[in-house]
Image (spheres, helix red, strand yellow):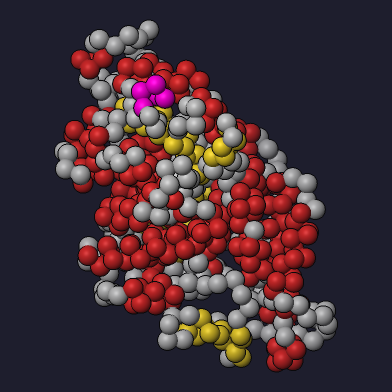
Amino acid sequence: MKFNYDEHGLIKSITIDKDGHNLANSSFLNKGVGFTEEEREKFNLVGIVPDSIETLEQQAHRAYLQISSKNTPLGKNIYLNSLYDRNETLCYYLLQNNIKELLPIAYTPTIGEAVENYSLQARKPKGLFISYENKDRIEEILDRRINQDIKLIVVTDGEGVLGIGDWGIGGIDISIGKLVVYTLCGGINPANVLPLQLDVGTNNSKLLNDPMYLGWKHPRISGKDYDDFIEKFVAAVKKKFPGVLLHWEDFGRDNARKNLEKYRDSICTFNDDMQGTSIMTLSNILSATKSIKSNLKAQKVVMLGAGTAGVGCIDRVCDAMAREGVSIEDARKNCWLIDRQGLLMSDDKSLVDFQKPYGRDRSEIENWDVENPDNITLEEVVRNVNPTILIGCSTVRGAFTKDIVKHMAECNDRPIIMPLSNPTSLSEATAEDLINWTDGRAIVATGSPFEPVHYKNNTYQIAQGNNAFIYPGLGLGSLACKATLITDNMLFAAAEALSNLSPMLKDPNACLMPDLTDIKECNRVVAKAVIKQAIEDKVTDVQASSDEELEVLINYASWEPKYYKYEKK
């Protein structure tokens, strides 16, 4: 299969070597009854597809009626997967034209339920599974991929899936879902992607004792065995796919950071849990502070949840504060992190390395009114600090109580409150409560989608701090310019570019985030900023200065869900 482009970098046709059943059974190339009369003759499809010829729009209408007949979100998710297996173009067209309704079905929050039920569903295999037992056959397994020209890999080991934990090889649905979002929201060509599952066992006793579980029934490997396996995997990826973007997804807390830090200087790589969530959060904060005519270094930030995502967010916020002229040490003093043991304290020997920079000195809390100095609660931190920003990455449902939120509203004209945990059932607060408890003054971003809130004759659109607004653009820009690394400057450029698109900058009562229907264009804006920064950081050989040149670069890395003309090889 070869893509043929015009002078603007747009796909004009595809040269293929399939016909007959091989073509009709290729999910990427199949058009179903969308094949024209000429194509049916040319590619030996007469009698293989029904005689009726329909447009993509007509096919999507039928597909929408079918998915609408499903009674549950999981049922709709299963239908989308089935459609994807038959006709990827139609699936993406359906998603694109019903994105508000179907993105939560294709990815969060429904994807969590799909992961939990993975072993109970008979599906056409997608991607590849690399088990620890096959650690010496990784290159051989990579050679068995369906797509040959791989530019983007999303890999998981399924240990830290969303907010639901260790679900073993069910994590493959996360890798698949992330790549769907890359294409749907960023336009990345699905012929260039590969979802991967590293099966290193599971510590989920439910799975280990389940005769239906399809993964390796063994406790998770750890320590040197795990590290050596990851090293072999990365080496094989670098050998087979030079120039690939490797996206780590839903690894456990310690492994996520360790893997990223070990390999980020030797391969173009990215961790969405640490970096995607953090730049999305930073973008929302930048938008919010700009809208209230403040600056970032003046903010006092409280974070509930000091795991990979939570600390990653605060790291990014502190980096941005430092860009405004304060030292990184002073920036960290503006941030308070609470985890299972309460407020992180510097003398707590249980702190892991990435938490230690945020441990508070005992002298700072000498005059605080707290019940137990060894376990200072979120409410006690909020009452003593009077923060301007409250963020949740804890997966503790309802953690942002009425008392906490009302105190935030007493201290701030426009409190910035972001319950980012997902799925919805694990959110620290509902959007409705946050609006009601702050008399409509809170600037809200959530991790899961919430319906608009009606309060005192006003309707408040709730911004979902959805990483889909930013990581597809980061990936698109990196691939378009063939970046060798993803730098911190590129991450900041992505956050800054997205923040400037906030409707709240023009109307203080508007939504913090652009409308979901604009998500693809938002990611193209992010991609342009990423390319410019990659050029400045000298991690690409590409040179592009004009907007037109950037557009062409992005077009070459892009794909649209439409029926392209097929040329016979």
Q: How far from the left and from the top, in percent, is residue 469? A: 46, 54
* Residue 196 visible in the current orientation: no
Q: Is residue 328 left or right of residue 93?
A: left
**In the depicted view, which residue is nearer to us: 238 or 519?**
519
Residue 410 magenta-highlighted: yes
Q: Residue furthest front?
A: 457
x and y, in percent, of residue 530 in the image: 33, 62
| Image quadrant where residue 332 sits | top left
Magenta highlight range? 408-412
458 vs 367: above or below: below
Please state, as top left, top right, bottom left or bottom right, where the C terminus lies in the image: bottom right
User: Which residue does the image show at 68% across and 38% down from the upper left?
Assistant: 210
Q: Quadrant of residue 489?
A: bottom left
Quadrant occupied by the N terminus: bottom right
- Relative depth, front residue between 55 and 42: 55
The answer to which quarter of the image holds residue 553 is bottom left
Percent position of residue 112, x then y: 60, 43
Residue 283 visible (yes or no): yes
Q: Which residue lies at the image location 35% right of the left edge and 9% below the top edge? A: 370
Is residue 48 highlighted in magenta?
Answer: no
Secondary structure predominantly adopted by residues drawn in magenta: helix
- Tell me: residue 191, above or below residue 157: below
Which residue is found at the position 63% from the left and 63% from the top?
97
Q: Position of residue 122 (x, y in %)?
A: 72, 54
135 lies above or below 414: below
Work out whether residue 22 or residue 443 is closer to the camera in this orientation and state it.
Answer: 443
Q: Residue at x 44, y 60 (%)?
A: 523
